[in-house]
Image: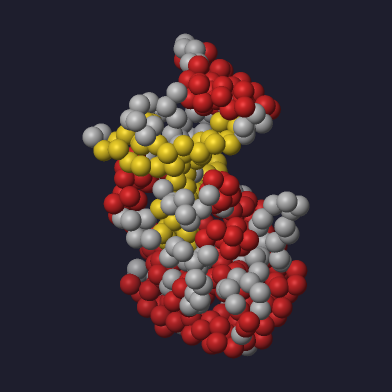
Amino acid sequence: MNKYLDKFKSFFEQSFDGDSLNGLARSHQFVRRKSVLDGKRFLELLLFSERDTKLQSLEDIAFDFSEYYGKHISKQALQERFNDSAVEYISAVLQQQLSKKANTVFPSENAYRFDKIMIKDSTRFKLPWQFREDFKGHGGHGIDSQISIQFEYDLIGGGVADLNITPANRNDQKDSKETLDRIEQNCLYIRDLGYVSQEYIDRIHESKSYYVNRLNTKWTVLDAAKKPLDFVDIEKQMSKSRITCVEIDVLIEKGKKLLPSRLVLEKVREETYKERIRKAERAARSKGYSLSDDYRAKTRLTMIITNIPKKWANTEQVRKAYSLRWQIELIFKTWKSQMRLNRVKPVRIQRFKCQIIAKMIWIMINRRFLAAMEIPDYNGKKPIKLCEWKFFKVVMRLSQKLRMVIFYGENLELWLGNLFEIARKKCQSETKKKKNNNLEILNIFLA
């Protein structure tokens, strides 16, 4: 463990050095001469004050400052510090954290088939209507203001490829098109359907990389003879033969291009089908059209496409690979339950931005710890998979001690050793009967 502790120590010295933080603050005109609240102290207050910002007042922040620094700051003075320069400063600190890739701190010693397994999705939540100019909602249901957090990370190394806070009206499809240049060679990309465009599939092919995604029902899909697939007939044949899952080699039409892909079709439960049809029929009635037989047949199926070679993964393994995507949903659930990310009240917009960005900094720091403890072959021990929700719950309890480590020079090795010990005993993922956890899925077909 010592080699990882040494790298953590180096990481913290670089990331939370007072001169470095205040240097960033000066570059954004945040630091004032003779101010009791410099950049480092401002960051500390945001990172370690009350998690539930809906309950937090300026008086609470001022009291926290007085308790730790023995100096008084008025609510008015504190309010004035939440300005555009403060937002730029906190944003720069977040970018500083994101620039320090996990694999440069924790060298990966794996033998996985792919260099990275990139999982991406977004989470949204409603904001007070007063924020609508900066965070416009996506429309409908009376939502004037809403925020979107785009997140993409590497399941193998833990590194973060994208973390972007935007208004909710910048949808996933737009994000996908604007980030095509970030697709790397020999990586596996697993994304929600909202990000999956033909341009995205084409770019992955051109980059000699791989994908596992759901099929867009509006795409033209051809069989090996270049004839459109008849999903009505396929679904009938599956029902007649009582087959629950089949795989077909297909061609996805993109302009004049035909992109080869594997299509995995799995029948959904009857309850799932009825729920899908109920929602689709309600939407169709409101727009004055009826559902086609083709659409109804597709609704009975989960349709997954991939370009992973068959010799690397069979049909069942492709299904399991796509299930890895749900890990990011658990991450978002953890952020909201543990960090109370979606608990917001009307405040000065710059204060809200500083608080939400600071929470993301806190999350990124502790995800780095999480990635370290899941390193394969750690000290010769069998690799483990930690439950992120359990892990963050533990780190929350130890957060004030982490505060003393980062900002007051207390023993980092001691804190980390304690965290490693608790996490490995209390935070391991539970494997459900007849189901594999994420680490087991990786070892089954990716190694």
Query: Is 358 rendered above or below residue 318?
Result: below
Q: How many numbered circles are shown?
A: 0
Which residue appears at 55% of the width and 58% of the height?
Answer: 445
Q: Give 355 or 123, whichever is nearer the viewer.
A: 123
Q: Position of residue 187 (x, y in %)?
A: 41, 59
Does any portion of residue 368 appear in the rendered image? yes
Q: Where is residue 139 in the image (x, y as percent from the top left)?
A: 46, 31
Query: Is 15 rendered above or below residue 309?
Result: below
Which residue appears at 34% of the width and 60% of the height?
Answer: 185
Q: Give 313 or 15, whichever is nearer the viewer.
A: 313
Q: Where is residue 408 in the image (x, y as percent from the top left)?
A: 58, 84
Query: For this view, does 318 lie left or right of residue 256?
Result: right
Does any portion of residue 347 appear in the rendered image? no
Which residue appears at 62% of the width and 32% of the height?
Answer: 243
Q: Position of residue 241 (x, y in %)?
A: 62, 27
Query: For this view, does 63 lie left or right of residue 175?
Result: right
Q: Give 78 or 150, whichever is nearer the viewer.
A: 150
